[in-house]
Amino acid sequence: MAQASTTRGLRRAIAKEIRQLDDAVDGIQTAHVGPDELGAMGIHVERVAPDGIYEALQFEPCFFMPLASTTLTDYPVVVDEDERQISPLYDESSCYPDGESTVWEWDTMEEARSTYHHVTSHVWAIQHDNSHSNENESKPLEDLTPWGQWTWKSHPSPQMANFSAPGEWRSMDWLENNTHPHAIVTLIHDLSGNDTSLARGEVKAVVWALRYRYKLKEHKSHAILPVLVLSYMGPKHGRIIQAHHDGQKLVVQCSPFIGLHEENSPEMSLFIRYELAIPVGLTTHSICVR
């Protein structure tokens, strides 16, 4: 009973701070915002690196564990003319075959959307195709993860998009599960990103997702509601962000700005496997462990 009372009090305090942060983030007027400015608001930004082979990002504490890199070779996508095709990456030469494209004609939002569709079409194919098999068994990949129990939906809130300059962005998918306090959000941006700052849309999506989720009754026994953001922008790059409030501050851990130029690359595999991430970590107390 005492633990439940402590958790309720902590959740109320966190929810109040998140509301204040959300109001502060609405005041950001630039497309990019640096760690120092976010720190002044009360948002603690940490850079995390992938291991040398892009097996996983070194989040600490860790709330989302990607599938092993061997999963995509053990369970390859089997595609024939009657099956779902994997969405190709954006190729400007196919839009401007005569070399007419200029830097001003480059459609960053469509490029980001193409990368998002490539990842998610791959995820859906390996999730639902019963022909995936290895030497020992044949079953859909979703049976190997809790993914099949997650709800995949487009979040209806207008707070998860901004169609005005600078830095137009929108949420494409929102994944959550009543049995886990974790959520996964995907974003696309009409913006070229960089490795020294976060996009305004990334910060807004993190803070609003937490504000929304602390209202949910399904997770009232959890003090921590982790959010994973997969963010796609130009030029053919993306970033993976893990965010949580630890009871003292909002912690935003972000990967480097990762190039996603090749379909069959370790970097692309990393994003696909994080879209299939397994929820892990201690969320019932304010002090979390890996």
Image (cartoon, rainbow, N blue to C red):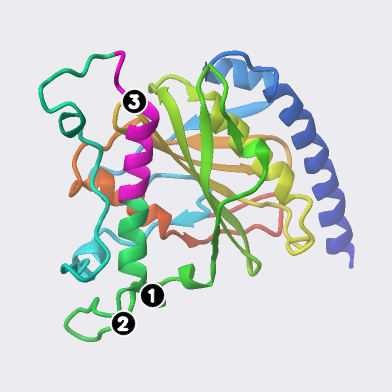
**Number of the label disc, if any, that sits on residue 139:** 2
SS at mark 2 in the image: loop
Image marks 1 and 2: residues in contact by CB distance under 8 Å: yes
Mark 2 surroundings: few (<14), some (14-19) or many (≥20) residues within 10 A: some
Mark 1, residue position: 144
Give the magenta-colored segment's residue range.
Answer: 104-118
Rounded to the nearest angstrom, the CA distance separating label 1 from label 3 is: 37 Å
In-image side of 9 versus 89 (left or right): right
Quadrant the N terminus occupies: bottom right
Residue kind at label 1, given as amino acid type = Leu
Mark 3 surroundings: few (<14), some (14-19) or many (≥20) residues within 10 A: some
- Secondary structure mostly seen in the magenta stretch: helix
Rounded to the nearest angstrom, the CA distance separating label 1 from label 2 is: 9 Å
Does the magenta portion include 100? no
Q: Quadrant of residue 238?
A: top left
* 249 over 274 or under it: above or below: above
Residue 54 visible within the image: no
Mark 3, residue position: 107
* 138 over 23 or under it: above or below: below
Give the residue drawn at x 32%, y 41%.
114
Residue kind at label 3, given as amino acid type = Asp
In-image side of 5 versus 197 (left or right): right
SS at mark 3 in the image: loop
Q: Residue furthest bottom?
A: 137
